[in-house]
Image (spheres, helix red, strand yellow):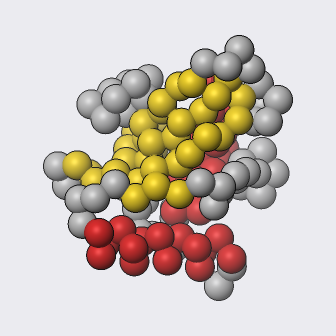
């Protein structure tokens, strides 16, 4: 089992223990390397639906991710397509796991080069818990 899979399994276990509580981690997935490791997976079958990510109701819905590692890489891929390169045009402040109304969300808070912060919600229900 890879390190990322082990971390994902630990996060899943904590989430299940915490129930509806928000679980926040900083820096566990500081760079998903979407453009390198998972580029092929992202080209083959990943679809972004839903809204622009401004709220859970308008979350970016990630479809077609085969597991949580590819799904998280898709989140970073989406952010790079929308905001530019990570650690150049924006940096990750925090990544938070939320559970609302039988859905699972990742909330990524990023800081842009101008100092402003953006909250981007991803609906990860389809791939949440898949290893």
- Residue 35 horizontal/vertical position (percent): 78, 45
- Residue placed most toward the observer, 45 or 24: 24
- The residue furthest bottom is 1
Drawn side of residue 54 relative to residue 84, left or right: left
Q: Residue at x 40, y 58 (%)?
A: 23
Drawn side of residue 67 relative to residue 32, left or right: left
- Residue 61 horizontal/vertical position (percent): 40, 39
Q: Say above or below: 14 vs 28.
A: below
- Residue placed most toward the observer, 125 or 30: 30
Q: Residue at x 67, y 19 (%)?
A: 115
Q: Say above or below: 112 vs 77.
A: above
Drawn side of residue 59 relative to residue 116, left or right: left
Q: Say above or below: 88 vs 77.
A: above
- The residue furthest top is 114
Q: Residue at x 82, y 29 (%)?
A: 88
Q: Is residue 44 visible?
A: no
- Residue 62 horizontal/vertical position (percent): 45, 43
- Residue 73 horizontal/vertical position (percent): 63, 51
- Residue placed most toward the observer, 9 or 21: 21
Location of the N terminus (image quadrant): bottom right
């Amino acid at each position: 089992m890879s390190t990322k899979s082990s971390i994902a399994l630990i996060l899943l276990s904590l989430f299940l223990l915490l129930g509806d509580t928000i679980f926040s981690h900083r820096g566990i997935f500081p760079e998903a390397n979407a453009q390198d490791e998972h580029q092929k997976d992202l080209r083959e079958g990943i679809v972004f639906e839903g809204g622009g990510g401004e709220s859970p109701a308008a979350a970016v819905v990630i479809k077609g991710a085969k597991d949580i590692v590819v799904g998280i890489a898709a989140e970073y891929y989406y952010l790079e397509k929308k905001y530019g390169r990570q650690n150049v045009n924006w940096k990750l402040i925090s990544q938070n796991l939320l559970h609302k109304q039988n859905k699972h969300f990742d909330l990524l808070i990023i800081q842009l080069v101008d100092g402003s912060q953006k909250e981007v919600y991803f609906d990860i229900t389809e791939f949440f818990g898949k290893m």
